Image (spheres, rainbow, N blue to C red):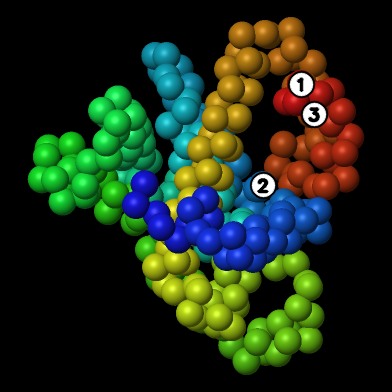
Amino acid sequence: FQLDHGMLTTSVSSWKAVRKLLNMSLSPSMINSYIPTVNRKSRIMVEQVSKLVGQPEQNFYHEVAKWALDMICATVLGVDINVQTEGTGVPYLKVVDEYLTLVTKRMSLGMTTGDNIPNFFYNITQDGKNFLKAASTFRSVSNIVMERKAPFNQSEKDDYAANPRKPRILLDMIYHLAAADPEHMSNESIAEHLDEIIFAGQDAMADVISKIILMLAMHPDIQERVYQEIMSVCPDENSELSQEDCSKLTYTEMFCK
């Protein structure tokens, strides 16, 4: 992967620190605070998918993947990159499969031959050249997030000092950790953490939601029950879904699980 300092490949002490921050950013109170963003991004996805009505059979995964990338950046990282409306990050989605295929191919080759190919020799092969190009695109979303992240102001710094255990946006906490310990959290380390968080979050959400859509399409009777429950809880299609509404969607939750 060439990610020496990401969450999966960093030292134990660094992993524990970032893992703790990730847990805090996904606390119940923080998840509830993401609901308005979830509503907004989901409404955009519905609008995009609605344009496909009446057209030949479509692969919805592409739209779901854009929604998922939009969501992970706007919620956990707190930076809106507008993938669905502006196309930011679409090159990332197009290259991620190629990137992972090349990584897997290189790992498999190493296990087959019993030897790991040095980077110098690998990089001059066609696979190596393709990998370096894909890796650059793979990093592009993390770079955009870091560029758009607003710097801390003094009031935010004071709030951190007064409330060190307060749950916050993950990226804010990572930057605060970097400011406190720059030796172990460089800009390169931050970028690699973001690479892994963005990939894992986007891939997991896109995979789950696309499978839910597929199962609903395959089972019209269950689809109807889910629809009726949602309409009974949220009869106004223009209303925003709340945490209280979510707790009433018992059958829908059961189906998703």
**Residue at point 62%, 50% (across, down):** 40
Which residue bears the numbered disc 1? 255
Give the numbered dot on residue 39. Answer: 2
Q: Is residue 15 left or right of residue 182?
A: right
Rounded to the nearest whole Å, what is the CA distance between mark 1 and mark 3? Answer: 5 Å
Is residue 232 visible in the rendered structure shown here?
A: no
Q: Is residue 2 visible?
A: yes
Q: Between residues 238 and 208, which one lies in front from this camera angle? A: 208
Disc 3 is placed on an element classified as helix
Which residue appears at 45% of the width and 17% of the height? 54
Amino acid, disc 3: Glu
Q: Is residue 10 above or below residue 227?
A: below
Give the CA distance from mark 2 to mark 3.
Answer: 17 Å
Residue under pointer 3: 253
Label 2 sits on what residue type?
A: Asn
How many numbered marks, from 0 up?
3
Task: Return the disc, 2 or 3, that comes first in the chain's sequence.
Answer: 2
Q: Nearer the viewer, mark 2 or mark 3?
A: 3
**Circles 1 and 3: CB atoms closer than 8 Å:** yes
